Image (spheres, rainbow, N blue to C red):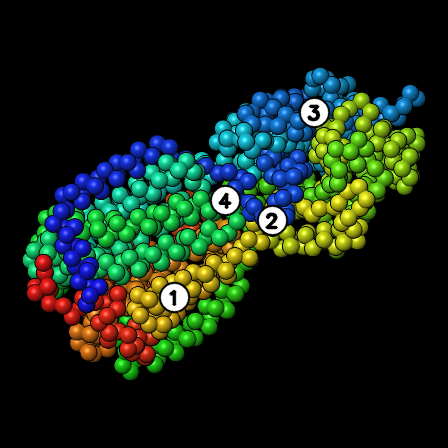
Amino acid sequence: MKAYGLRLRFASWMLEHRRGALLVFALITLAFACGLPRVRLQTIFSDLLPKDDPFVQVFRDHPNFGNPLTVMLMIRRTDGDLYQADTLAKIWQLTRDIDLVPGVDHDQILSVTTEKARYYEATPEGIDMRPLMGDHAPRDAQEIAEFRSRVDKAPNVRQFLISADERSTILMATFIEQRLDYGVVFDAVQKLAAKARDEHHEVFVTGQPILIGWVYQYEWQMIGIFAVTLGALILALALYMRNLVGVLTPIITSTVAAIWAFGLVGWLNISIEPLLMVIPLLLMARSFSHSVQFTERYYEIYAGLRDRKKAAAVTMSVMLAPSVLGILTDVLGIAVVIVAPIPAMVRHAIFCGMWAWFLIPTGCVLISLLLASLPAPRNIEQLVAGKGSGLATRLLERTLRVPALLTQGRWALRTSLVVLIAAVCVVATARQIKIGNPVEGSNLLWEDSEFNAAVRAINANFPGVNTLEIVLEAKDPDSPDWTAQQLDTVMTEMRLQQLLEADAFAPRATLSFADYLMESNRLFHGGNPQWLQLDPRERAVSAAAVGAMMGTSAKNFGHVVSFGMQHSTVSLWYADNKQETVDAALASARRAVALVGEDHPSFRVRLGTGTIALQEAVNRVIGRYQHLLLLLLNVLVFIMCALAYRSVLAGVLLLIPVNLANEALLAAMHLLGVGLDVNSMIVAAVGVGVGIDYGIYLLSRICEEVQASGDWGLAISRSLQTTGKAILFTASVMTLGILPWYLMSGLKFVADMGLLIMAIMAINMVLALIVLPLLVWWVKPRFALRQNTIVGEGGHIDWAGSAP
């Protein structure tokens, strides 16, 4: 009783000074609100990557090799080949226009109209190497024929820049991350593509900047859906509560917590990842849930006291401990994500973790001040005693008779068997969850989206949009010797290509600096194809390198060698970035690297970078931290609950349904075809912390009821009809309220996460209302009968006599 007495005195003091307390809340809210204009919804690509992964280190050391921040445009002629004046003019102009887009790397633009696209020709004077196009696009039949003949002399162009059916060509432009504004780039490139499209030409656009740009395009749609969801929640509250205080308190407390959270990130000047804006919706749901639980208990106490201030004080004293404990589990569910070495996840954990933390002052103190200040509900008998209650209340009460019946007495054994069988099936299904991307293209967008259609079109006509890079890195980058054209380097590149092309999982295409040297070597020997293979001698390789570089600079080979001719890469193209493709590609590359050796006298072989390697880097974080996060969260929640109830058994009882809920969530993700990635892992981690809230509220109420009646069955029934009603209401309303996220979203990821949140709410609700009471019925824990626990006090108190 000592802990309860302290809480009661604190609550009484706060309510005696509620005007001053409300003023403090208003001032704090105003201070946080001043940070709202500084809030930024922004994706920082490098912050989506794990800092400690070796693949990410290779990418950061060699950003010009296989850089994912590359936009690819494919121009396709619909009524013939591309060797027509208007088509070539479009390609020419499109290449010049994209060079004007802000943030583009002018040295990393490649198309058939740039200097990098060169042809080689043997002449009596030596090797003639020139760009495919001169200072303008071919205009007449003679110039077009000349251009076509040059393309025939450029085998790499025929493979990588012009499709096999000669109807498509591709333009690639890499952007500098520090100067990249995804919204600006997306708008500029889409306008260029729209300008180039006509009845004879199709234009397909893809690349990481475009993908993130699509996410930006749907920001206002997400805000609109958020508004629809809030409107639905408010309507549901009004229909259920049918009084002003029951509607206003959740709205005000949730809004204040949101202002504090967004204002904080504004003041901290950290960006919010747009894709993860679905998690604040889950936190809004938690705020509503806590408020409804609090308000429902206030109704019960006010019915006996008929004094708003006294009822609010007693409600705060009774609900403070379980509310704080429940909110802290929310905080832990988010905070554990910080251990993952991905900066974007850390920032979002700070944002959402502080939001959850703010639910303590707003959902425990501010709500009590509001309950004491707002007009008392006039329909208190209907809300508490059920007299003349509305349809929603009657429906909830009838529904709750089912778990009350199934979780005790003769039905308990049958229900336990059903739960056990269901648990086995759920765990078996959850084990089938896949880590990584399950589709060709991006799972962020719908399969028929413009972006994914572009990915499929480019993959069908070219080696593809997904590369894996094996970097040959000079040990001494400052050496005057050009490591990239040394014999050992070139021979290693060729050996790697041979091994990979002969592998059971061969890439669709390979490219290295050695390919250009081989073509140069052939031309040095009169163009005879039998001289395509390089003579494995230093002098021959050096001569071929001199020939390849004649009349040009290293910048024109920037996709395969560094500007200083020290580092080089072997590029591998694969059909898609599905996880099974990623796994097979990396296994093949590791075998090849093992055979050629990683360490050489002047360079080391590093695997790797490119979209395939970077995707795997992120997926490895999931593999490394998925179980660690769950274990860490279980340990922390167990310790908190065991201390709060002063019983190890209490921690065990609460964690059983929560972990079953986590398994059910993974099973639901598998059935929905949602892969486990960084974004969905965060939602799942938050879901675990959220899930235990219901259990804490219900177990605390069971403790109160069993102390009051001494009858376990009656305690379970009464708890389900009171606290269980609030759980059922909030979970059901949130499940229905989130439905617009699936029905209205243009982003598949947001729709999937909406389904996941609905699954989280529904699964946790069912397990809290059935599994937890069932466990209590069988175990009949002795800690529930103690009156010295931090939570669970109040059910035995005479409200009228205890009121301040």
Confirm or deny contact between disc 2 and disc 4 (CB under 8 A).
no
Q: Residue 148, percent across and down?
A: 77, 26
Q: Quadrant of residue 324?
A: bottom left
Q: Residue at 85% across / 39% down in the picture? A: 487
Q: Which of marks 3 and 2 is nearer the N terminus?
A: 2
Q: Name the residue under label 2.
A: 53
Q: Earlier in the sequence, mark 1 or mark 4?
A: 4
- Gap in Å between the C-alphas at discs 3 and 1? 63 Å
Q: Name the residue under label 3.
A: 114
Amino acid at the residue labelled 3:
Thr
How crowded pointer 2 is (Cα within 10 Å; few <14, some 14-19, many 20+) is rated as some
Front residue (pair 78, 369): 369
Apparent side of residue 524 relative to residue 390 in the rendered image (left or right): right
Q: Mark 4 points at which residue?
A: 343
Q: Name the residue under label 1.
A: 638
Give residue 255's mark. Answer: none
How crowded pointer 3 is (Cα within 10 Å; few <14, some 14-19, many 20+) is rated as some
Q: Earlier in the sequence, mark 3 or mark 1?
A: 3
- Gap in Å between the C-alphas at discs 2 and 1? 32 Å
